[in-house]
Image (cartoon, rainbow, N blue to C red):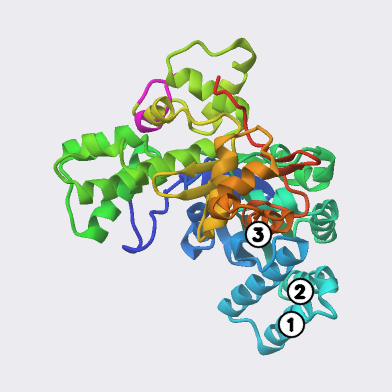
């Protein structure tokens, strides 16, 4: 591989995905990047901002494009306004980096300021529209928004938000382009596809499936890790690490850290490593329930149920079957297959608790800093997944000392307060909870996944 700088990636890194995305961009088409957890979607999108990549793939017109990276995790609020404000903010940064004139910079900065003012923030879409018009019509750039980590916002954003994004693009057709990265296909993120149809039909016809690294890319990333940590792996260790992880970026990094910490017992430590298990959990939570059921069958060397056979092609698209180190009908990583066999994760579950380390995961996202009562509540509900837990049961578990006092009791208000705080932490939309569900007159239940792993 030809490498430009030590800190940069080779020009042919993720070559197939990069070439396909930029081919769509050159045609003025928006597209979708779908990949399992920690597979490198963010690095892929960021690489599109590099001048050398654009120069190599877009030809003479490479410098007429402005790529703006949008990490939805940076939004001030998980809402349409939060996305619009972030788009204006990141657009301002990129225009500044490109050396735009002071008038342009001041104008976009002023539009962003108005979008954040309480009295005028409801006009954020109008301000973004003006900024896009200035960038495209006056400066002559084709504007590409690289929207990363879109899953949770897609679940929470109101219907009109998707219509607004589509309308904005239609007003600037071929000059405004979206590249959207998610773990699941957009239509699987909403119960009502009609809610997002206007936007989904814009990006989903051009879907790029991002799987684990190719062997060349995996070896390059492993060598880069070696250089960063000033170590050199033996060829046998390198080959074992690559085959065990299947070239999955997150697993490769976790496995390398295990090697650093336990240089003499790599094979024995990989499967039991908490870091490796975290990555396996992210992959598992990135799959739709039917995909999870098919993977469980494959991991257990069972015959895949007839109704799931169509899912096999989907798994291949996502790089979960086959690859440089296994046969075409096997799970891509022995480590991931072993995780499923040993941990028996619940099919369809988006909430997972690592009780040993007292960590809560929701949709592959680690929820840090839960208060003790918040953790106790989700732990109890998860232990009785799908069952209705009465308020008396919850009070006894959350406040055993108070319940043991004669004549004492725990008011509903105290329990409701803990529930409210927990919902703010884990629910995509706390006002419409999808995980911690109130069963009126009976109590609460964790509505998440199948009760039995089949």
**Vertically, is 137 above or below 211?**
below
**Residue 299 placed where, x, y %?**
43, 21
The question of residue 334 being in magenta is answered with: yes
SS majority, magenta? loop
Q: Position of residue 48 (x, y in %)?
A: 53, 57
Nearer to us: label 3 or label 2: 3
The residue at which mark 3 appears reads as: 421
Tag 3 secondary structure? helix
- Secondary structure category for the residue under label 1: helix
Q: Is residue 352 above or below residue 25?
A: above
Mark 2 element type: helix
Residue 277 falls inside the magenta stretch: no
Classify 10 Å Cα crowding around label 3: few (below 14), some (14-19), many (20 and above): some
Residue 113, which numbered label?
1
Q: Left or right? Give the position of 410 relative to 192.
A: left
Q: Nearer the viewer, residue 160 or 349?
A: 349
Whichever of callouts 1 and 2 sits on the residue coming sooner in the sequence is 1
Question: Which residue is drawn at the image coordinates 45% and 46% (left, top)?
Answer: 14
Please tell me whether residue 83 is drawn above or below residue 305 in the rendered image.
below
Where is mark 2, residue-wise?
131
Q: Please identify the quadrant where the C terminus is shown.
A: top right
- Quick one: 174 or 116, which is closer to the camera? 116
The Cα–Cα distance between marks 3 and 1, rounded to whole angstroms, is 31 Å
Q: Which residues are magenta?
A: 326-336
Q: Can you see residue 204? A: yes
């Amino acid at each position: 591989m030809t490498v430009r700088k030590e800190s940069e990636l080779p020009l042919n890194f993720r070559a197939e995905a990069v070439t396909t995305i930029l081919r769509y961009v050159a045609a003025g088409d928006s597209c979708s990047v779908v990949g399992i957890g920690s597979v490198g979607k963010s690095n892929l999108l960021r690489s599109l901002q590099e001048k050398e990549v654009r120069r190599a793939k877009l030809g003479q017109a490479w410098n007429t494009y402005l790529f703006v990276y949008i990490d939805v995790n940076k939004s001030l609020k998980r809402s349409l306004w939060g996305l619009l404000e972030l788009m204006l903010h990141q657009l301002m940064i990129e225009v500044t980096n490109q050396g735009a004139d002071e008038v342009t910079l001041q104008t976009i900065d002023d539009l962003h300021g108005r979008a954040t003012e309480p009295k005028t923030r409801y006009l954020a879409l109008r301000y973004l529209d003006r900024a896009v018009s200035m960038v495209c019509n006056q400066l002559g750039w084709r504007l590409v928004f690289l929207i990363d980590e879109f899953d949770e916002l897609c679940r929470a954003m109101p219907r009109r938000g998707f219509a607004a994004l589509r309308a904005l693009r239609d007003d600037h057709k071929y000059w405004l382009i979206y590249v959207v990265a998610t773990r699941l296909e957009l239509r699987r993120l909403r119960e009502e596809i009609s809610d997002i149809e206007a936007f989904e039909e814009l990006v989903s016809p051009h879907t790029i499936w991002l799987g684990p690294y190719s062997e060349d890319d995996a070896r390059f990333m492993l060598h880069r890790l070696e250089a960063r940590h000033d170590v050199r792996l033996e060829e046998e260790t390198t080959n074992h690490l690559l085959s065990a992880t299947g070239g999955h970026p997150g697993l490769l990094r976790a496995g390398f850290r295990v090697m650093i910490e336990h240089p003499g017992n790599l094979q024995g430590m990989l499967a039991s490593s908490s870091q490796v298990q975290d990555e396996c959990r992210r992959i598992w939570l990135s799959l739709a329930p039917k995909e999870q059921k098919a993977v469980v069958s494959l991991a257990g060397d069972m015959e895949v149920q007839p109704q799931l056979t169509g899912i096999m092609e989907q798994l291949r698209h996502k790089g979960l079957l086959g690859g440089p180190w296994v046969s075409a009908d096997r799970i891509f990583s022995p480590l991931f297959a072993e995780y499923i066999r040993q941990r028996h994760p619940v099919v369809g579950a988006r909430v997972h608790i690592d009780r040993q380390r007292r960590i809560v995961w929701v949709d592959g996202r680690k929820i840090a800093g839960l208060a003790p009562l918040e953790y106790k509540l989700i732990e109890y509900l998860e232990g009785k997944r799908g069952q209705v837990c009465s308020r008396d049961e919850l009070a006894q578990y959350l406040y055993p000392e108070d319940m043991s006092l004669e004549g004492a009791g725990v008011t509903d208000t105290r329990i409701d307060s803990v529930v409210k705080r927990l919902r703010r932490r884990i629910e995509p939309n706390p006002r419409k909870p999808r995980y911690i569900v109130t069963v009126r007159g009976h109590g609460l239940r964790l509505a998440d996944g199948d009760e039995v792993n089949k």
